[in-house]
Amino acid sequence: MTDFSVEKRLFERNDAFSTIRFLTPAGEMEGVIEDFSIGGLGVRVDGPLPHVGLQATILFPEFGGILSEVVHATGNQVGLRFTDTPERIGELMHAVKKRTAFS
């Protein structure tokens, strides 16, 4: 019997409520980050959803862009998986940790 009560995740997910912009070939979108992990972001958006598989550049204030891919888009939720270099993702995690340590 499979235990579905425990969510299987590769990375710990943290709640984060902040507005973010991201660029796709279909245009610029804005949304609210609902969760954040070393693997990517969950974003709540208004308006049309991007297609799964689209490449996106997430624009972080005071950090710049990081490459990602749309891995799911349902309802008003978009999942973005980081695809940038491990070094760049590490730099982002460090910047976020440093910023939230003083919030």
Image (cartoon, rainbow, N blue to C red):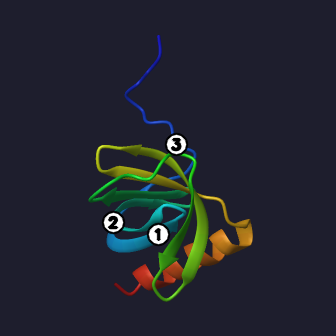
Write down the quadrant of residue 66 in the picture. Answer: bottom right
Mark 1 and mark 2 lie on one chain; the one further toward the N terminus is 1
Mark 2 neighbour class, 10 Å CA radius: few under 14, some 14 to 19, many 20 or more: many
Q: Pointers 2 and 3 in contact (CB under 8 A)?
A: no
User: Mark 2 = which residue?
Assistant: 31
Identify the residue shown where x is 55% and y is 83%. 64
- Secondary structure category for the residue under label 1: strand
Q: Residue 31, percent across and down? A: 33, 66
User: Mark 3 = which residue?
Assistant: 9
Q: Is residue 2 left or right of residue 5?
A: right
Mark 3 neighbour class, 10 Å CA radius: few under 14, some 14 to 19, many 20 or more: few
Q: Nearer the viewer, residue 50 or 39?
A: 50
Identify the residue shown where x is 55% and y is 51%. 11
The amino acid marked with disc number 2 is Gly
Q: Nearer the viewer, residue 61 or 86?
A: 61
Q: Nearer the viewer, residue 15 or 44?
A: 44
Q: Is residue 71 above or below residue 32?
A: above
Where is the C terminus found, in terms of image quarters?
Answer: bottom left
The amino acid marked with disc number 3 is Arg
- Secondary structure category for the residue under label 2: strand
Q: Residue 38, percent across and down? A: 56, 61
The amino acid marked with disc number 1 is Phe
Mark 1 neighbour class, 10 Å CA radius: few under 14, some 14 to 19, many 20 or more: many
Q: Pointers 1 and 2 in contact (CB under 8 A)?
A: yes
Q: Is residue 99 above or below residue 16?
A: below
Identify the residue shown where x is 39% and y is 73%. 20
User: Mark 1 = which residue?
Assistant: 22
Compute the Cα span from label 2 to label 3: 23 Å
